[in-house]
Amino acid sequence: MSIVADRVRRLDALIDKVSLIPLGLSEDQDEQFQGVDRIEVSALTSPRVTELLQIAKGLSSSSLSRGHLSKRRIRNLLVESGLTGEEQNEQFGAKSALETDAEWLLVGKATVQTYGLMMSSLLDQITPLSDDIWYWDEILSSYPNSLLYTMQTSPVRMGKWTREIWLESVHRFKDWRLQQLGHRSAPRSRRHSRTHSDVEGLTITPSIQSDEESGDDEVSAESSTGINLTQQWRQFYGIVRESITEKSLSNIRHQVLSRVDIGRSDARRKLARLQKLREMTATGLGVLLDEGLDLGAPDQDEGAYNEEWRGVLERSVALMDSTLRGSLTLELNMQDFEDKIFAGVEQDPELSIHIEDIPHAARPAILARRLLNILDEGIPQHAVSASVLARKNGRPSRLVRYWIPAIALLLSSSTILRVLVNRKADIINWIRDLGATTRDFWFNWVVEPIKKVIGTIRHDETSEIAIMSRDSLKADRESLERMVVEFSRDNPDIAVGNSTITEAQIAEIRTRVKEGDVTPILKAYEKDLKKPFVGAIKGDLVRSVLIQVQKTKVDLEVAISGIDALLKSQELVFGFIGLTPGILVSIGIIQYLRTAFGSRKGLRRGKQARRTRRVLRKMDKILTESQSNPQSNNAISYRDRGLLVCEAHVLRNLAQGALPREVEKEFIEDLDEFAKVRAIPELFRVLDRIRWAYAEWLGSMK
């Protein structure tokens, strides 16, 4: 998480700055220590100081992407330093000031690493809590979801109720048996007491004592077998019925509320406990952010500041220890929880201000042992306890959530198998037909149109669109020319008005026919039409009509040729139009298959967008509630600080991968402001900047 990483790196650099001993020492760096009090450069050759500085260098986090070391690495380096061993108690008087400063440097870096590890642990605990809280919100926001949850958890509630009835019945039955056995053995016991009183004062030998003990065992056996087995079962059955009746009468809530209301009540109770756990964990995180390792800036008095930051280390370790001990007490309210944390720090018995006779050189070793105890017990135990609470109040297990469909599938498996066996041939035919249909669709509506489009682009003559054959118009036009010329030669008086016709006139007639002019034919037609019957028998009426039919055919072919040319000019457009249906259907099928059987990336991104808006709403709500608090004084509280940082952590995880790299860097810088700024108005401005600056990416994750 960027918030933790940046804070740990800043504190680690500040420890290097305020420490009296810099890292990376060598013999040619003597000028670095000119003017530094209490440091002898010749003492830097001490093996102990060199070892401590090497371990402190290993505790640096400048080259780590997470910002802090792992728990195992921090622990191993602390143990390797020797500060956690008991032999340190004997070496306090023999330590030099240089060795003590080196130990403080090492402990300071270890404290920073443990501080970062603890904040990361708290953030990691809050993330699944948010998921479970969202789950319970979904259950409570819809009646069908509540009904489904009630059905899912009904076997669990029934088993719990049965177990309580069984344990209570068994306990009552044992009490009844003890009463029966005591009642039957009472007279025999009184008789034995009278016998003992009669022989009072006599010496009882060991043989007599053993006889009496065996007699008592026989009495107990007779009493136990004296109760009839049928009577025992009848009594046990009556006890069970009585327990069930009392349980039903005592639990009036189950009689008043419906089953769904009981399930909703259970969900509401778990939701409240999860929210309380989340708030307390967030409060602990807010306390660590605002009060932990508040080193500040060095002032003019270097010696006073040196003692001050070492005291801050002690109080920060005590603060981490107190936070771990009290952050899982769900019965406390937030104010009592905060008071308990700070009271634990103030009353911490291992702080140097509470121990007057502690040597100054022993303080690093005490801090190292406390850090080791936090690493070995505090953080792991806190994580385990938080995990137990989260698991107890979180969403049900997969077995509870999916037992209904599993049983339904199991019960219907025989029917499904029988249907599959009986309709085996039909199913095979369906699959075969589906494959053939898919193949034909692909080749006929996708592959072939693509080939035609490619052929059109390459001017493939075989792929050209044509309504009529290529040479049809030419042949009909030449036939019309011959008909008109022959008619003109046979009837020159009609064609040219003379008894003879020259070749020049014939050529002119040919030219006019090519242009569509058949005047000689029309003149003969007009002449014969005056006397149609005579013209039809003796004249050229029939011949002129037939030539005009040929002329009409040529005109029609000319029109069709124009349409053909128009289609050829738009052939590529028609090719793409023919390809479009196949492409659209293919894309639709592929998208459906990706949605149904793929990674469901689109659904996840849509869900992330909705969750992002909810996170931004929660951050605004946190700031609004904190501002409305009359005791806030425009400063955010520990609880709200922790909740705000937790929501920023969730928002960072949701936006990961959705932003460009250069934008993501700026987004992380803006999120870091929530861990630095304390004034509520400034936090509002940061939230508004995130909304308008990254709305393009945060709102488009769908």
Image: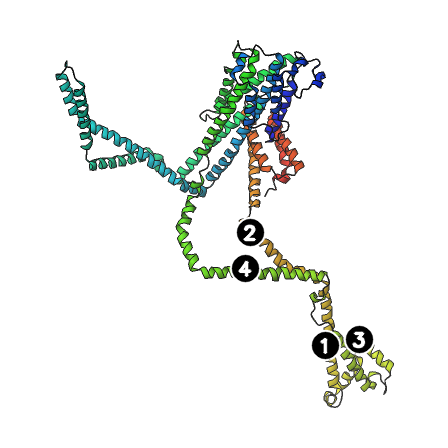
Task: From the viewer's side, name the closer residue of 624 and 21.
Answer: 21
Amino acid bearing label 2: Leu
* Residue 616 in sight here: no
In front of the other: 359 or 241: 359
- At numbered mark 2, what does the secondary structure look like: helix, strand or loop? helix
Secondary structure found at label 4: helix
Few, some or many residues within 10 Å of mark 3 (<14, 14–19, 20+) = few
The residue labelled by disc 3 is 514
Please provide percent x and percent y for residue 356.
Answer: 53, 9
Which residue does the numbered mark 2 point to in the structure image? 593
Specify which label sits upstream in the sequence, 2 or 4.
4
Point out the tag, 2 or 1, that comes first from the N-terminus.
1
Give the distance between the C-alpha atoms of the residues marked 4 and 1, in whole angstroms: 49 Å
Assign a secondary structure to mark 1.
Answer: helix
Q: Is residue 503 above or below residue 204?
A: below
Q: Quadrant of the N terminus?
A: top right
Q: Position of residue 350 (x, y in %)?
A: 51, 15
Measured in 3D between alpha carbons, the distance from the residue under mark 2 to the one under mark 1, in whole angstroms, is 56 Å
Question: Which mark is in front, 2 or 4?
Answer: 4
Residue on which disc 1 sits:
553
* Image position of 650 with respect to 189: above or below: below
Amino acid under label 1? Answer: Lys
How far is the residue under mark 4 from the one under mark 3?
58 Å
Q: Amino acid at mark 3?
A: Lys
Q: Report the disc number at residue 73.
A: none
